[in-house]
Image (tube, rainbow, N blue to C red):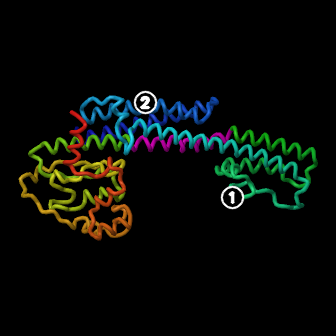
Amino acid sequence: MTPAEELALLDQLSADVEAQVLAAYQRAMDLMRRGTAPRDAITRVMDLFTGEFADLMAASLSAVLQRSVGTESALAINIGPVSLSRKLYAEAQDVSNIVAGIVQRNVRGYQDSKRLALQLFEGYGFREPDAEPLQINPENPKLPKYMREILDPDPVRRKMAQAFARIQVDGLSTPALRAAYSQALDAIEDIQGTVGRVELEKTLKTAFYERTRYFAQRIARTELHKAYAEREASLLLADEEVEYVQIRRSRTGKDPCICSLITGRNQYGLGPGVYPKKVAPNPPFHSFCRCVAVPRLDLTGRRQPTENENADQYFLRRLGQPVAAQVAGSREKLQRVLNGESAIAVANEAKNPVYRIVNLEQAANAYSATGP
């Protein structure tokens, strides 16, 4: 599989994952609209999504590794310290708790709105003449906390203020006040069922769809590219005609990161990002990384070059602040590298061992250890 073919597969996988997550979100919303408790709805939907996602990963990994990878094997893949199945289960629990909390706070907010309307109605005769009406906005500390939370969207805030304005008018007679109170309650019910529901579903889309989409995309793209890079490392290591490789960055990689250094430094005097194959850093270097190692057959036969131990420092000093700090990971990490530490060693300190940057020979050995 060529790098271009692998990138095309990554893009297709990304589109398929997005479609799966969107379908899961729509199923969850449909269940909740029909009265299923939010926590139960998310649990049911995520159980189904786990199987669908594992099937998709198994098919994509089979294509990349060019050997059959079953669904059970895909679920057993280690994502950091745990398997994919456990990672998906933990994510489902987190998402269900978040969604349930949002819905509960929303319901509590409307309950508080009705209680506030009753307080205004019952205490209306004790209000000081010409006193300012109660301001209905999320910054007003006099409003209950949960009510302030549902007032964040402008459409809800505007309609709620209109509802409460009816019972905050001086000079209303008792029958008129009672009618205004009744209208306010009706308005609150209407807001909760119309514009409030729309705004709540927008919030739930962020809580479920956006979070799950990012979570699934990160796993899918990172794990697929990791598998591809390890297989390519095995092929390159076994090819006696390949002595040097170049690490090339994807055209989509625009932000400064550790990839900038690995593909840009001239550590062996062979050009930016060119290394003797065994010691070349092997992609991926972070989540969503799309860097690749390609053979440099034009360099075959060259005398083994001498490593420039100051290549990291030279490259970073040329960048200057703050770009160099972005590449190194922070200002503190940059200073450590400038003081003589290896940029990759510093970057690896914060990484889970499964995702630490290794050289091509180590990656090839990891691939061989997974089977034929």
Q: Is residue 19 left or right of residue 127?
A: left
At mark 1, the secondary structure is: loop
Mark nearer the viewer, 1 or 2: 2
Q: Earlier in the sequence, mark 1 or mark 2?
A: 2
Q: Is residue 370 above or below residue 135?
A: above
Which residue lies most toward the front here?
A: 81
Q: Residue at x 22, y 65 (%)?
A: 311
* Residue indicated by mark 2: 51
Q: Position of residue 42 (x, y in %)?
A: 54, 35
Q: Amino acid at mark 1?
A: Glu
At mark 2, the secondary structure is: helix
Q: Is residue 126 left or right of residue 261?
A: right
**How many marks do you count on the picture?**
2
Magenta stretch: helix, strand or loop mostly:
helix
Residue 198 highlighted magenta (yes or no):
yes
Q: Amino acid at mark 2?
A: Gly
Q: Position of residue 355 (x, y in %)?
A: 32, 49
The label number, if any, that marks residue 139 in the structure image: 1
Q: Residue at x 52, y 35 (%)?
A: 25
Q: Position of residue 277 (x, y in %)?
A: 16, 51
What is the quadrant of residue 303 in the picture?
bottom left
In which quadrant is the N terminus drawn?
top left
Q: Is residue 159 left or right of residue 200?
A: right
Residue closest to the eye, 285 or 133 = 285
In which quadrant is the C terminus drawn?
top left
Q: Residue at x 39, y 38 (%)?
A: 84
* Magenta span: 194-218
